[in-house]
């Protein structure tokens, strides 16, 4: 199984380690030729405006859009969730996305004064259910299309009920960063998605 981590900006190394701990040797992707060699992609957390700019500069925007349209499994965390959304609120006017999951996300949605926080998230379909999640200037999901399944919501507090994990077909996104907490359940869930989508080659 060949999984790539989009390595333009953000916490690439943490995703590579989380995948390695999930028994998958993943590789960093910076060029269209490297993208062509992988069965699946992880888009890290970081800064979606920077990832968008660099994806355009490195000639990756259209190739990634095309692979997504062709069914490649992709997991995006935080900025990666924003990059997967069809509509981004509070984005930069020139910000582009990979147009994957039919959803509207709001950048920095939890409030500027709350730069980062931790909260429990109830996750559907991930063994054990509850997830202790780290949010860093995170987005939330404001609207979803008919084919999008809500996998997780904030369990309590001011933001209780906010959608922070979704899946549409082979695309998975979380507003939080499991790659920073050592909890491998989301990565393992994604690896299983990839396994089911792409027979070994
Ligand atoms: N931790 C993150 O990935 C933050 C996302 C960032 N606020 C953005 O808009 O891209």
Image (tube, rainbow, N blue to C red):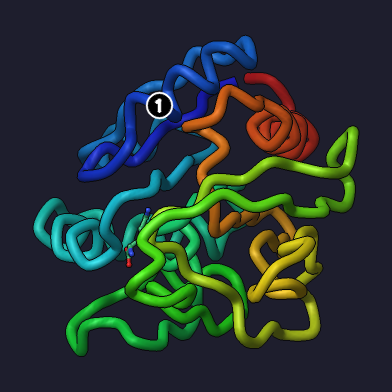
Secondary structure beneath disc 1? helix
Label 1: how many Cα within 10 Å (few below 14, some 14–19, many 20+): some
The residue at the point 64 percent across, 56 percent down is 171
Q: Is residue 95 left or right of residue 15?
A: left
Q: Quadrant of the C terminus?
A: top right
Q: Is residue 6 left or right of residue 100?
A: left
Q: Nearer the viewer, residue 177 or 192?
A: 177
Is the residue 99 above or below the residue 119 in the image?
A: below
- Identify residue for label 1: 14
The quadrant where residue 51 appears? bottom left
Mark 1 CB in 8 Å range of ligand 1?
Answer: no
Q: How many marks?
A: 1
The residue at the point 69 percent across, 20 percent down is 200
The quadrant where residue 186 appears? top right
The residue at the point 82 percent across, 54 percent down is 122
Judged from the image, the quadrant occupied by ligand 1 is bottom left
Is the residue 189 above or below the residue 68 in the image?
A: above
The residue at the point 45 percent across, 20 percent down is 26
Q: Position of residue 11 (x, y in %)?
A: 33, 36
Question: Can residue 187 be seen in the rendering of this structure?
Answer: yes
Q: Nearer the viewer, residue 83 or 139?
A: 139
Q: Nearer the viewer, residue 118 or 50?
A: 118
Q: Position of residue 133 (x, y in %)?
A: 62, 45
């Amino acid at each position: 199984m060949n999984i790539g981590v989009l390595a333009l900006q953000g916490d690439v190394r943490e995703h590579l380690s989380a995948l390695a701990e999930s028994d998958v040797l993943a590789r960093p992707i910076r060029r269209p030729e490297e993208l062509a060699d992988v069965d699946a992609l992880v888009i890290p957390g970081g800064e979606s405006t920077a990832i968008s700019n660099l994806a355009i500069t490195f000639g990756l925007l259209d190739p990634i859009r095309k692979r997504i349209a062709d069914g490649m499994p992709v997991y995006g965390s935080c900025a990666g969730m924003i990059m997967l959304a069809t509509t981004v609120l509070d984005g930069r006017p020139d910000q582009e996305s990979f147009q994957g999951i039919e959803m509207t996300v709001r950048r920095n949605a939890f409030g500027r004064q709350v730069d980062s926080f931790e909260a429990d998230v109830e996750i559907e379909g991930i063994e054990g259910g509850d997830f202790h999640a780290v949010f860093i200037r995170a987005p939330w999901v404001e609207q979803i299309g008919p084919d999008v399944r809500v996998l997780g919501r904030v369990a309590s507090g001011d933001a209780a009920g906010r959608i922070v994990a979704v899946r549409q077909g082979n695309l998975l996104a979380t507003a939080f960063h499991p790659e920073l907490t050592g909890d491998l359940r989301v990565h393992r869930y994604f690896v299983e998605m990839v396994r089911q989508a792409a027979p070994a080659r």
